[in-house]
Image (cartoon, grey):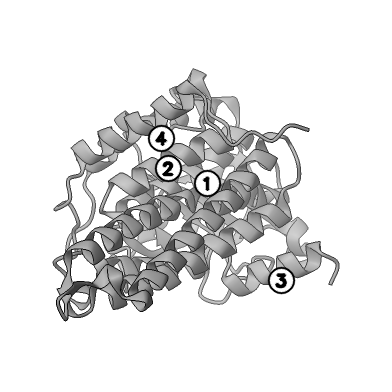
Amino acid sequence: MDVEFGWSNDQENRYHEALDATRAAFPADAVRESTYYTRKDWLQLGEIGMLGACLPTEFGGRGLGALDTARVVEAVGRGCPDTGLVFGAAAHTFACAMPIAAFASPAVKEQLLPELASGRLIAGNAMTEPEAGSDSSKLGLRTKPVSGGYLLNGTKSFVSNGPAADVYVAYGTTDPRAGFLGVTGIVVDRDTPGLSVSEPMAKMGLNSCPAGSITFTDCFVPDDRVLGGPGQGAAIFQHSMGWERACLFALYVGLLDRLVEQCVEFARERRQFGRRIAEFQSVANRIVDMKLRLESGRLLLYRACWEMDQGYPAVLAIALSKLAVSEGVLASATDAVRTFGGRGYLSADGIETVLRDAVPSTLFSGTSDIQRQLIAKEIGL
């Protein structure tokens, strides 16, 4: 089998168009540390094509596969200094819009997908609970079958986009005795009676993306809002996690690309002891390690997305990719602070912001420990 490491003209043009449009829409001073993204921001991401990159063309999407979608996300992650915004958009697309595109009824697809692709609606993924983080087989949210639909009772926490979202993809337990086979996925509108949303939580990083908890109290959702069918929620969630763990982390590849560029430029210009600090081996080696993490993570991510496009299970490739990119961006953000020295600790250059935005990458979409467990299982340990 031939191995091709190049991009077609269409792929190159798509990447650079997304990068240029992102830089124009979100200039370097666009980072918000005390406010959240706006509806205007969201609509701009829709115009750039990120929100609908992998959604079907008949619903306003671009119909791209995983690899081409990841390249668009990478470009936006590189061009936009507001990583919280890009993260919120990726979570919206991969954890919410994609399961709707793949498993919702035709009527729900027709109603929601064009709005999600354009940015006219914001979506939040309601899976995590106070007592169910990594173990998604023991969800406290109850989805009780009743005449014409389901009655939801329970609380979800850490819902990215939650306080801003118009619609949620929620997962709850329909049959507590069935484990994973008892989980059901449901699409819930924000204005559904019995649904309440908390104020945004104070967080360490990704500050422009609001996260909060959602409480369901005798919240009725009709049958046609079920994804797939009763008991299929766990499989649907894992399908969405494949897209999220692969394509979402392309934004961190883009961020790493920008970070390496910043460190190279700074090391060339900054002088100490009469020399550019780039000439000190300790500084140069640190930036070389950053570049190594960038390219290693990028290749693993591209391979994972390629395997998805080929229809392979891709479990091992996705776990390796997610682990490499998330741990790589955290280590490199720390190295960037060291490279910038005292300036890296200040807010002006955005380096400390990158570090805080990098930390949660090792936690969401399955922690690094979970990825290692998946890898160990896949290689036969």
Say which amino acid is labelled 2: Val
- Distance from disc 3 to disc 4, alpha carbons, whole Å, reads 34 Å
- Distance from disc 2 to disc 3, alpha carbons, whole Å, reads 27 Å
Location of the N terminus (image quadrant):
top right
| Observer-nearest of 55 and 275 | 275
Q: Residues within 10 Å of mark 4 (few under 14, many from 20)?
A: many
Mark number displayed over residue 73: 2
Tag 1 residue: 247
Tag 4 residue: 116
**32 up-or-down from 4: above or below:** below
Say which amino acid is labelled 4: Leu
Marks 3 and 1, the one that precedes in the sequence? 1
Instruction: For marks 3 and 4, give the one nearer the viewer.
Output: 3
Q: Contact, CB < 8 Å: mark 1 with mark 4?
A: no
Residue 291 lies left or right of residue 314; in this view the side is left
Q: Is residue 155 visible?
A: no
Picture coordinates of residue 113, whole percent (x, y): 46, 30
Q: Is residue 42 visible?
A: yes
Marks 2 and 3, the one that precedes in the sequence? 2
